[in-house]
Image (spheres, rainbow, N blue to C red):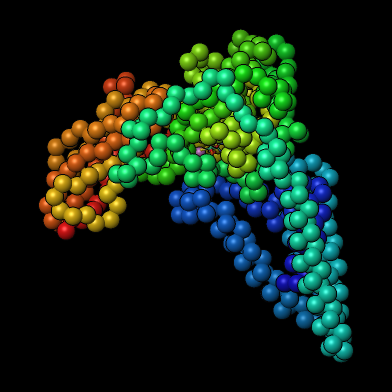
Amino acid sequence: MLALAAALGAGHLVAAFVGSNASPYLAVGNAAIDLTPAWLKDFAASTFGTADKAVLLGGMAVVMIALAVVAGLISTRRPLPGQVLIGVFGALGIAAVLTRPDLGQIALAAPAASLLVGVWIFGFLHRSAMTTDTSTGRRRFLFAAIGAGIAGAVGQWFGSSKDAESSRQAVTPLVPARTAPPVPADADFAKLGTPSFITPNGDFYRIDTALVVPQVRAEDWSLRIHGMVDREVRYSYADIRDRPLVERIVTLCCVSNPVGGPYISTARFIGVDLADLLNEAGVRPGAQQVLSTSVDGFTAGTPVSTLLEPDRGAMLAIGMNGEPLPVVHGFPARLVVPGLYGYVSATKWVTDLEVTTWDAKQAYWLQRGWSEQGPIKTESRIDAPSGGVRAGKVRVAGIAWAQHTGIDKVEVRLDNGAWQPAVLSAQVTTDAWRMWWAEVDAARGSHTVTVRATDRTGYTQTDQIADVVPDGATGWHTISFSAA
Ligand SMILES: Nc1nc2c(c(=O)[nH]1)N[C@H]1C(S)=C(S)[C@@H](COP(=O)(O)O)O[C@H]1N2
Ligand SMILES: [Mo]
């Protein structure tokens, strides 16, 4: 176990210089995320939610420790079994680093350091354990433990000294030339249990494949637009922030949001019109998708036609709720496309836009069985009541969304009774959610309440239950409560 710790510590230290994702433990975790079959990923996401990354890393630790203990026990005579195990782990680390699109060959130095240090330390400790001089043996074990800890800690400290947060703090206030409309007091029914209309940055849902949040400093960032364009263009952070900025209120939603789920939030995004940037590059006829790539290799494919729609409001966003984008939400820059699920549009830490066709390139989730097109489905959710209530008039409240179309009507029903209309909050923009509340008459006992929304195309949410794969869940949200 100690040799393994020393190996991981050495790899972590080297990774601080060659790319923090090259730290073998993280590289293997990231490779596991990318290689996980869709069914297992769905299981993990639905079982552990956003804790799935912690579960993955914890599970890897348990497996590694168990194997290390076994290898140690069968190495009592000769060091070979333990050294072979470390060699296998090292090879895994090397293979994992090779699969990472964000890591160059130099990054192989990290798992290679792990392999060499691990094999050497295991042999060293093995010899120490064999000596008859137990105090020397103990001292050497202690040295190895301390060395492993120091290597890991220095790697962690040095790696994080290049964090994006200090670069983010240095960004001077982003002042939009065109601000979003003010949010009226009746835009939410937070007092009745709905979320606040604008989600504070710290509460905004987070979904991505990154085990370690990518750290990109604004001064190192640039966005390249290439492919089926008249001229390739490149923008620095200063180029973007010095343009007239626009602010838009947009509700982002994840395709993995189950009916009634939490992966939906709203912010004021500040940035520039993506269509302007694409037009500066000059999109050639025949182009179908814009493949956006993040610094860590995630990709999303967005229809060119949607991005160039004059009223779509697709953005390259650099600000969120008056601040520079938080690092977890994509600092320095991300895409935001009203009306499309995040997996086909909302690339965070975006550095590359390739104008191409659907046949030429397949984005990350498309390769994993999700749909090519991802318009957000009209849905609604009940947030209150949660828990028991007093019998009589009971207030039910929640949210409804039909981004870029707008909500027309929300209805609720108690215990499969008649549908009754809910009161809607003020409409701020069709690109954001709307809150609703209604009062139902609930006698003592247990009840269910169900909600459904109708959007401005006249479409009423279907009660047909569909899974989140391949293009978003459907079905009516129902909750149970008891009245006393
Ligand atoms: N770089 C990167 N961007 C990404 C993703 C990702 O895994 N990596 N996930 C997408 C998905 S599936 C969603 S739903 C949104 C979530 O954005 P948020 O974390 O800011 O809420 O980001 C999108 N952008
Ligand atoms: Mo998502």
Residue in the picture at 57% in, 23% down: 176
Q: Residue furthest left?
A: 443
As drawn, is 350 to the left or to the right of 143?
A: left
Residue in the picture at 81% in, 83% down: 138
Looking at this view, is 471 or 134 the one in front? Answer: 134
As drawn, is 383 to the left or to the right of 262?
A: left
Q: Please tell me how many numbered marks the rendered image carries.
A: 0
As drawn, is 302 to the left or to the right of 349?
A: left
As drawn, is 184 to the left or to the right of 226?
A: left
Residue in the picture at 39% in, 26% down: 428
Looking at this view, is 421 or 354 the one in front? Answer: 421
Give the quadrant of residue 128.
Answer: bottom right
Residue 153 position within the rendered picture, expressed as x and y whole percent measured from the top left: 76, 61
The C terminus: image quadrant: bottom left
62 versus 436 height, above or below:
below
Can you see residue 62? yes
Residue 375 position within the rendered picture, expressed as x and y whole percent measured from the top left: 44, 27
Quadrant of picture, ligand 1: top right
Residue in the picture at 80% in, 77% down: 142
Can you see residue 96? no
374 versus 102 height, above or below:
above
69 versus 232 height, above or below:
below
Residue 403 position within the rendered picture, expressed as x and y whole percent measured from the top left: 41, 27
Looking at this view, is 73 or 440 the one in front? Answer: 440
The N terminus: image quadrant: bottom right
Residue 356 position within the rendered picture, expressed as x and y whole percent measured from the top left: 63, 20
